[in-house]
Amino acid sequence: MRIIFLFVVFFCNLLVYAQFKVIFSSRTFHPNSETDTLNTLKAIEDFEIEQLDWMYCDSKIKLNKLTEKNIPFSLAINPMIPDSSGYCTAKFRVLDIEGKPIVAPWMKNWSNKNLFWGCANNKDFYELFLSKCKKYADLKCYGIFVDDAKMNFQFADKNGCFCDKCLEEFSSYLLNKKSIDNKFNYKEYILNTKRDTFFDKKYSLEFQQFQKKSVIDFHLKWMDELKKYTNNKIKFVTNNYGGNWGEIYSLFDIGLAEINEKNNSLEIIEKISDKLKINKKEQYLSFASTNSYDNFKFILHSYFNNIVCILPWDHVLNESFGDNKIKRYYANIEEIKPIFDFLKNSNLKECDTLILKDQLKRIKYKETIKYIKLFEDSENYYLSLYNDLNNDKKIKLKVLNHKLKYSLILSDVFKTKLISKKKISGTIILLKFQK
């Protein structure tokens, strides 16, 4: 047995790994204008995409091209869908205590005009939402992707929605739980007592729970109707930010979690993976950075925790949230595709490091090592040395036996440098041994 070549990659442990799937996000179907130089179909072909999620499109002509390529796709909908006037008019929307439509904090500087969120207790908005979902189902999507599924409850820090319907429903909700006057109006109570809604301990938490229940009931109702409409041939997908599977997100079949650039760590991914072992949900992760090395790290960490990271293309960069002009990232095929090709063709499982005890004797390493793990596929063993991601110190590995030869592959992708024929530096060292 001998070392035939070496990767420098980021690696973590799991007993058996799922089959890798190349999933893609194109928020709109490019090109979407005469000046748009991007092309969704070309990117699908170049990256050899197997599934497309989180796309806003209702063009039958464009979507038929995906169907012709046998690419399953989900179509996105959010609480800001325009009403019959083509705009998000206030009559269907979440209102603050002053009766003004609420805009999400991260959207306040956006140039879009339609930023008002629909109310979960508004029957007209429900019909608008359901009608759009049925239209999507007719376009042969495999799933409905609900962007910002928390709806009214997203504004829980402000209590939620104070529209007439919510106030009426809340009074009914309280009548079943508390002794109140049947003419009770929460908005009037707040204004008359001059209380800050957030600090009103008597009814504030009840109102927040009511808002959450309203959102849950809203989703359960349209999901049930859409299952009947499609003969149960539809899946429900949402962007469960940070891998959250709370009461609202748990209604969905699949979560696509956006991970903030500051949380690009093994620990975050491991926590998400642990949750999946309990709730048995299907989870994808979404991450994009202008730093290619961070993208590689995240993709590999996700895969080796049995979670698919969707290919970073047409992704909003976290640094641009709140800006007037959102910045998007489009992966370079020469950088990203080799990583996805490697993972797509891998079928790894963990095995005992004792198998390579003789080889381990010939390797020395320094600095903080969190663990040594060994993996195998049908042809090779992969030995990984891993240190704490939060530790700035790098592993220094030295192969004692000069007869052990190796070379770097993917070095151009990772832009790593071979320090010498005897020493390698990197957060993860992965030695590949031929069986």
Image (tube, rainbow, N blue to C red):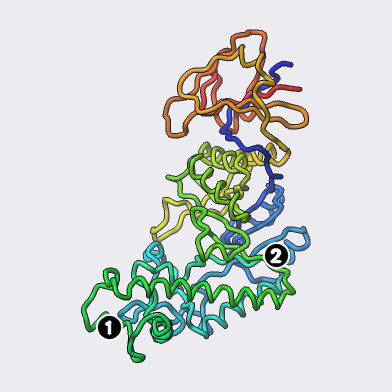
Res. 157 image quadrant = bottom left
SS class, disc 2: loop
On screen, 316 above or below 350? below
- For the N terminus, the image quarter is top right
- How far across and how far down the image is residue 252, in percent? 59, 64
Residue at 73% across, 61% down: 66
Residue designated by label 1? 189
The three-letter code of the residue at mark 1 reads Tyr
Residue 1 visible, this orientation: yes
Cα distance, mark 1 to mark 2? 46 Å
- How far across and how far down the image is residue 274, in percent? 55, 47
The three-letter code of the residue at mark 2 reads Tyr
Residue designated by label 2? 142
Res. 74 image quadrant = bottom right
Residues packed near mark 2 inside 10 Å, few (<14), some (14 to 19) or many (20 plus): many
Would residue 110 be found to the left or right of residue 195 on screen?
right
- How far across and how far down the image is residue 248, in percent? 52, 66
